[in-house]
Image: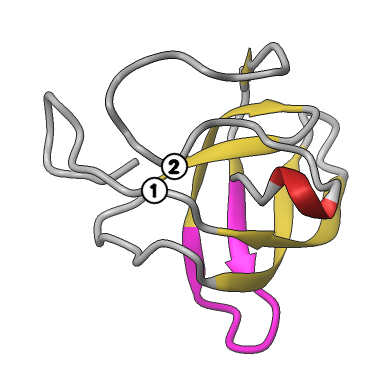
Amino acid sequence: MTSNEQTGDAIAVDNDCAGTERRRHERYVVDFYIRAVEQASRKPLGDLCDISLSGMQLTRPESIAPNQVFHCTLEAALESGRRIRVPLSCRSVWCRRQEFGSNYD
């Protein structure tokens, strides 16, 4: 996810997808299953791959156009059986087919 520096919003990655790493915050691989679900429709947006202070990466079967705003909930089930739900708003920045596989990041 990214936004315009002039607005003061955080920038996680440049919008050019040129392959140059421009992240400002360290990304952490998610070690357990977390799904992003649209709040209104309850349709899955994708599965969380990694996360940072200012962005996250999802994997999903279909592509998403850049600059779409989503109101979603991150949902996880802990080993104890307890469920965690974190509501948030996010904006898509880029989408591309995975190098190996048929999903999109």
Q: Quadrant of residue 33?
A: top right
- Give the labeled residue for mark 2: 15
Numbered badge on residue 30: none
Q: Residue at x 34, y 41 (%)?
A: 105
Residue type at mark 2 is Asn
Residue type at mark 1 is Trp
- Describe the element under mark 2 as helix, strand or loop: loop
Q: Is residue 65 left or right of residue 32?
A: left
Q: Is residue 55 left or right of residue 66?
A: right
**Residue farthest along the front direction in this orientation:** 6
Q: Is residue 38 magenta?
A: yes
Q: Residue at x 68, y 59 (%)?
A: 90
Residue 40 vertical position relative to residue 72 in the rendered view, above or below: below
Q: Which quadrant, please, contains the N terminus? A: top right
Asked if disc 1 and disc 2 are in contact, CB closer than 8 Å, the reply is: yes
The residue segment tinted magenta is: 35-45
Q: Is residue 71 magenta?
A: no
Q: Is residue 95 left or right of residue 41?
A: left
- Describe the element under mark 1 as helix, strand or loop: loop
Circle 2 packing at 10 Å, graded few (<14), some (14-19), many (20+), is some
**First in residue order: circle 1 vs circle 2:** 2
Q: How far is mark 1 from mark 2, CA to CA?
A: 7 Å
Q: Quadrant of residue 88?
A: bottom right
From the top left corner, tell me how far across and down residue 35 is, in percent.
58, 50
**Residue farthest along the bottom direction in this orientation:** 40
- In the image, 63 versus 45, the foreground residue is 63
From the top left corner, tell me how far across and down residue 28 is, in percent.
66, 15
Circle 1 packing at 10 Å, graded few (<14), some (14-19), many (20+), is many
From the top left corner, tell me how far across and down residue 102 is, in percent.
12, 42
Numbered badge on residue 94: 1
Q: Quadrant of residue 73?
A: bottom right
